[in-house]
């Protein structure tokens, strides 16, 4: 077996509101919605897929999830989210682990970090 992708699953309280937040505020696109009534959805930005689950059949608590999204650049996106009033929990900074990133919370308290690797120090 050779895995080729993965999706994080975040527990959310209201699926419709979460889809709206991820699409209108964060810039993801709605990929699918599942269930009757809908309780599960997927949102995508580029090659990154996040699944949102408002059903609680597995007993997981909302707001306890986290995702690190690797990007090619984060400064302009950070400014966009800041202007949109997103709850930034860790300001954009360059870190000793050779990443430039920031962390924010979705409406349920799930943490999402967007980061990009620093240019290689080697010539």
Image (cartoon, rainbow, N blue to C red):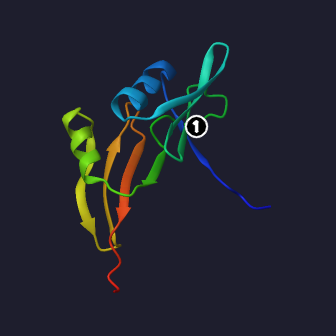
The one of 112 and 62 positioned closer to us in this rendering: 112
Relative vertical location of residue 82 with respect to residue 123 in this rendering, above or below: above
- Where is residue 101 shown, x and y percent of the image? 31, 58
Report the quarter where the C terminus lies: bottom left
- Where is residue 55 shown, x and y percent of the image? 61, 25
1 on left or right of 115:
right
87 on left or right of 19:
left
Q: Which residue is labeled 1 in the image?
A: 60
Residue at 67% across, 13% down: 36
Furthest-right residue in view?
A: 1
- On the image, which quarter does residue 37 sit in? top right
Report the quarter where the N terminus lies: bottom right
The one of 50 and 72 positioned closer to us in this rendering: 72
- Where is residue 2 shown, x and y percent of the image? 75, 61
- Where is residue 110 shown, x and y percent of the image? 42, 40
The residue carrying pointer 1 sits among few (fewer than 14), some (14 to 19) or many (20 or more) residues within 10 Å by Cα, namely few
Mark 1 falls on what kind of element? Answer: loop
Relative vertical location of residue 120 with respect to residue 41 in this rendering, above or below: below
Residue at 19% across, 35% down: 83
């Amino acid at each position: 077996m050779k895995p080729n992708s993965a999706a994080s699953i975040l527990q959310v309280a209201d699926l419709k509101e979460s889809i709206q937040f991820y699409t209108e505020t964060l810039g993801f696109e709605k990929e699918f919605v599942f269930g009757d009534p809908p309780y599960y959805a997927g949102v995508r930005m580029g090659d990154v897929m996040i699944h949102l689950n408002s059903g609680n059949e597995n007993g997981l608590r909302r707001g306890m999830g986290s995702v690190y999204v690797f990007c090619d650049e984060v400064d302009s996106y950070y400014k966009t989210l800041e202007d949109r009033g997103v709850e930034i929990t860790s300001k954009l900074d360059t870190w000793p682990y050779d990443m430039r990133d920031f962390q924010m919370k979705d409406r349920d308290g799930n943490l999402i970090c967007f980061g990009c690797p620093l240019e290689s120090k080697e010539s």
